[in-house]
Image (cartoon, rainbow, N blue to C red):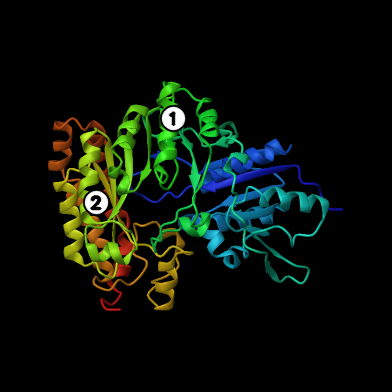
């Protein structure tokens, strides 16, 4: 007699690698949302956003253990999967890395769900309880009676996102910290859309959520925001491009303003936001204080190579228009494209300083499984290894064309060293950029700590030949 499933625990293990936003404790929404769905269906459900050690210390006893993983937490997820299976638990894995490499994950799980899990997970639990057929569950990867891995049809993305409940963060265990930046008010993550029609060849978003934008209704988002207090919480809109549909975004912002839901908020946008002055003004009025923008490169050839669909002039104008409105700019640059070289990397740093970007991350191009870039590097034999722990945009994992692997790693280190030099940190304080000043101090010392702790990684890179 198969034991009936009554409880489920959704785990998102933390990536504890050092980076500028290491102190920004913000879970992805998948585990909390799935726990909420299962609770609403009558199951006992919890979600955990903790380190591997803390997860094990919780002595979780749920019947089913769901584990969500990105590439840099895959090995942690696999260890947890092995541990809970040894305890007789049913382990279900999902998330971007598992969706890209389900056969690998099935070595450590009983089931995997590729893509979005809001429909598939409840169907799987129901099928297990009813001991019914698994073949109709879209996106499911499982073993048949012969032990052969079976991959069901690709998941159909949810078209009406309003069908999802609001994530219940009372179900989330995050330890002693609260969600958000250390020393700030709690940050509530809110997602208003999924998908992206752009084709950046290094981005895993489209592999997980598809090439078509899907939007929640304004009314549904407003109802979620009404649960929170602008005086007590900060909002992070988790969309990959919050202003993908400008008219829809303006409608939401106007309603937030009308109802007094003017939270301090931050979000991610593309540089083309500068083309809509009204949109920028509404964002300021609604409480926007910070924008995360993927500038990626100031080299036209690199921008073309990555299919970014933006120009250097677009980047300059966007910075000018956003700064004019007093919004904090966190710019993200990527080093390592085939058109890149050490000189172009240095040019990006000079550009960021010259144009007074408040804070930056200089990231290393990373061949994330599921992306066009990953498959290209694999075909060309340019992957260095598959040590997933280091697939975090801060470790070189492929052989670049115009750098040695060690040169590329050092380009990132020296970029952060220069941008977060004391001279520029103090300058931000003198210009009244207090947030940029605080982050700058933290980043300065973190960069020095990173280079000390990565001795073995750097030594390994130095031994790799310069030419591909």
The residue drawn where x is 15% and y is 53% is 350
Tell me if mark 2 has few (under 14), some (14-19) or many (20+) residues whose alpha carbon lies within 10 angstroms of its own: some
The residue singled out by tag 1 in the image is 186
Q: Position of residue 252 (x, y in %)?
A: 45, 33
Q: How many numbered marks does the figure carry?
A: 2
Q: Position of residue 263 (x, y in %)?
A: 40, 27
Query: Is 422 positioned to the left or the right of 130 in the image?
Result: left
SS at badge 2? helix
Q: Is residue 228 visible?
A: yes
Q: Position of residue 435 (x, y in %)?
A: 26, 33
Query: Is 61 positioned to the left or the right of 227 in the image?
Result: right
Quadrant of the image occupied by residue 442? top left
Quadrant of the image occupied by residue 255? top left
The residue singled out by tag 2 in the image is 314
Q: Nearer the viewer, mark 2 or mark 1?
A: 2
Q: CA distance from mark 2 to mark 1?
A: 34 Å
* Vertical placement of residue 329 versus 395, above or below: above
Q: Is residue 46 visible?
A: no
The residue drawn where x is 40% and y is 73% is 377
Depth order, front residue of 6/253: 253
Direction right: furthest residue:
1
């Amino acid at each position: 007699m198969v034991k009936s499933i009554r409880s489920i625990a959704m785990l998102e293990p933390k990536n504890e690698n050092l980076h500028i936003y290491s102190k920004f404790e913000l879970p992805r929404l998948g585990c909390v949302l799935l726990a909420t769905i299962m609770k609403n269906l009558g199951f006992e459900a919890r979600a955990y956003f903790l380190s591997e050690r803390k997860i094990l210390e919780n002595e979780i006893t749920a019947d089913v253990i769901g584990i969500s993983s990105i590439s840099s937490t895959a090995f942690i997820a696999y260890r947890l999967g092995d541990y809970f299976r040894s305890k007789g638990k049913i382990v279900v894995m999902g998330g971007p890395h598992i969706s890209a490499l389900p056969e690998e994950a099935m070595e450590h799980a009983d089931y995997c769900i590729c893509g979005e899990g809001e429909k598939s997970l409840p169907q799987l639990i129901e099928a297990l309880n009813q001991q019914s057929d698994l073949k109709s569950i879209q996106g499911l990867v499982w073993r048949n009676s012969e032990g052969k891995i079976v991959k069901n049809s690709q998941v159909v993305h949810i078209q009406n996102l309003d069908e999802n409940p609001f994530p219940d963060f009372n179900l989330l265990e995050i330890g002693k910290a609260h969600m958000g930046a250390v020393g700030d008010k709690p940050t509530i993550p809110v997602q208003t859309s999924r998908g992206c029609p752009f084709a950046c060849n290094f981005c895993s978003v489209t592999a997980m959520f598809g090439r078509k934008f899907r939007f929640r209704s304004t009314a549904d988002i407003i109802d979620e925001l009404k649960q929170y207090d602008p005086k007590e919480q900060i909002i992070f809109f988790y969309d990959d491009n919050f202003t993908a549909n400008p008219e829809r975004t303006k409608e939401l912002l106007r309603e937030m303003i009308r109802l007094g839901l003017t939270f301090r908020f931050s979000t991610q946008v593309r540089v083309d936001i500068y083309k809509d002055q009204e949109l920028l003004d509404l964002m300021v009025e609604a409480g926007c204080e910070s924008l995360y923008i993927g500038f990626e490169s100031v080299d036209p050839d690199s921008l073309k190579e990555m299919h970014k669909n933006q120009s250097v002039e677009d980047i300059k104008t966007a910075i000018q228009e956003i700064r004019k409105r007093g919004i904090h700019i966190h710019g993200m640059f990527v080093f390592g494209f085939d058109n890149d070289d050490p000189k172009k990397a240095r040019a990006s740093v000079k550009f960021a300083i010259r144009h007074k970007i408040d804070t930056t991350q200089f990231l290393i191009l990373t061949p994330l499984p599921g992306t066009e870039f990953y498959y290209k590097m694999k075909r060309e034999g340019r992957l260095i290894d598959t040590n997933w722990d280091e697939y975090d945009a801060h470790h070189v994992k492929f052989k670049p064309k115009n750098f040695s692997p060690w040169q590329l790693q050092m380009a990132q280190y020296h970029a952060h060293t220069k941008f977060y030099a004391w001279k520029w940190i103090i300058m931000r304080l003198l210009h009244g950029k207090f947030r940029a000043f605080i982050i700058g101090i933290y980043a300065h010392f973190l960069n020095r700590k990173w280079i000390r702790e990565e001795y073995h990684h750097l030594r390994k890179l130095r031994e790799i030949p310069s030419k591909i």
